[in-house]
Image (tube, rainbow, N blue to C red):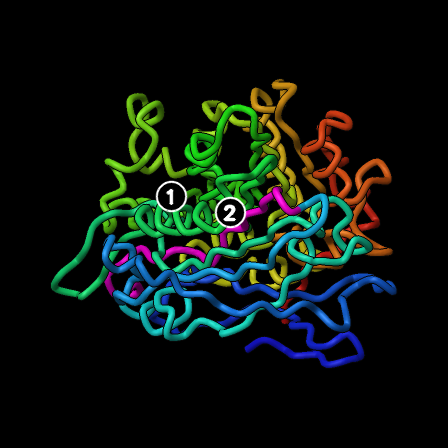
Amino acid sequence: MAEIVRGFWGVVFVGFLMLSKWVDSYEFEDFIFNKTSTGDGAITPTPLLIALTLIQGAAAKGAVCLDGTLPGYHIHAGSGSGANSWLIQLEGGGWCNTVRNCVFRKTTRRGSSKFMEKQLQFTGILSNKAEENPDFFNWNRVKVRYCDGASFTGDSENKDALLQFRGQRIWEAAMAELMSKGMRNAQQALLSGCSAGGLASILHCDEFRTLFPSSTKVKCLSDAGLFMDATDVSGGHALRDVFKGVVSIQGLQKMLPSNCTNKLDPTSCFFPQNLISNIKTPLFLLNAAYDFWQIQSSLAPPVADPHGLWHDCKRNYEKCSASQIQFLQDFRNDMLNAIKGFGLSTQNGLFINSCFAHCQSERQDTWFADDSPLIDNKPVALAVGDWYFDREGVKAIDCAYPCDKTCHNMVSK
């Protein structure tokens, strides 16, 4: 189980969620992790708490969670110069790739609004304080909850298992609800998401653009959503196997972008590296080059490392051997090669730091604080802001490990 450390700043979880043996580790990304450095602005002492709103008209549209309950979101209204600007954050939380773990998922907040928190903290990119979120603090900020198990993309059901795979309908119902609440008048809009939500922000980016007139400034941000079709430590493709299950069980073949499925198999079209070159809307990729979740669950999951040779290394990078570090360097190189073409476009943005991290936009300490991770002396928040507001182009790619001393690296115990 995760070790919990309590201190002045609240609760910091060191480690990761351990699931029961029969539940795939790919299901959740509830990694809340330790900081390798501390600073005065690390974690806000009094975070903003925002209540859950259920979408009351969603059931009539068939837009329901895995268990048939209503989907939901959390919203904090904008003010002043941000009153007509909207930031939509799509929640992450892995995927379910078998009937068995989708059924289990129905008993959690990732598959049922019955188990969702009634309030969520808004920190990082969702904070309402200028000193914590300089460019988006007074926007309308929304977090859309994730309860479909396939990055808001499915539209099918499994009647025998009483499973509703309605991610696409949830997306549409949420957007319709927000448009009715004033988003239709947006002058500026940013679609964002973390992890599985970061993948969703890529999949729905161009669709989001179509909601608004051409006069509205619309861009997208994917945080930790660049899941690579990587070779694992056994020479297999563990994450591809998982994605194949997600695509199959939810019937995503018909839901994925046709400009990809016309050329590649459907599973390949669930991997962002095969999607980003076709996104027409400006897109920013924020990702750790040594993505902690991908190391745990894609590169060295138990199925690929039955003898536990990677057990220590994948939990603490300082315990990796030279050959293991080289394997991780090769993973970073593959990531950089995958985004080469994407990075050539002047409208796109990049912040690829050489950290062992996962999701950096909603955590205050990694988004904008006194000791936040930096590339060229610029923290994530200012890089995203500079790119969104066209203050300057941002193609920030870090030097390889171990050169970056500003990282807040994840270490599990």
Which disc is residue 240 wearing? 1
- For residue 255, above or below residue 181: above
Kindly identify the residue that appears in the image at 29 percent across and 31 percent down: 265
User: Label 2 sits on what residue type?
Assistant: Gly
Is residue 178 highlighted in magenta?
A: no
Which quadrant would residue 101 be assigned to in this image? bottom left
Is residue 87 highlighted in magenta?
A: yes
Left or right, 279 with respect to 360, comes to left
Residue 196 is at least partly visible in this image: no
Which residue is label 2 attached to?
A: 182
Asked if labels 2 and 1 touch by Cβ distance under 8 angstroms, the answer is: no
- For residue 94, above or below residue 69: above
Residue 257: x percent and y percent? 34, 30
Q: In the rendered structure, which segment of residues is drawn in magenta?
A: 83-102
Q: Secondary structure at mark 2?
A: loop
Of labels 1 and 2, the one closer to you: 2
Q: Neighbour class for label 1 at 10 Å: few (<14), some, many (≥20)?
A: many
Residue 161: x percent and y percent? 17, 65
Q: Secondary structure at mark 1?
A: helix
- For residue 53, above or below residue 282: below
Task: Give the position of the C terminus as an image quadrant.
Answer: bottom right
User: Label 1 sits on what residue type?
Assistant: Arg
Kindly identify the residue that appears in the image at 38 percent across and 43 percent down: 240
Q: Neighbour class for label 2 at 10 Å: few (<14), some, many (≥20)?
A: some
Kindly identify the residue that appears in the image at 63 percent across and 58 percent down: 313
Left or right, 336 with respect to 184, comes to right
- For residue 234, above or below residue 161: above
Residue 72: x percent and y percent? 42, 62
Residue 45: x percent and y percent? 77, 72
Residue nearest the observer in this picture, 303 or 126: 126
Task: Give the position of the N terminus as an image quadrant.
Answer: bottom right
Q: Earlier in the sequence, mark 1 or mark 2?
A: 2
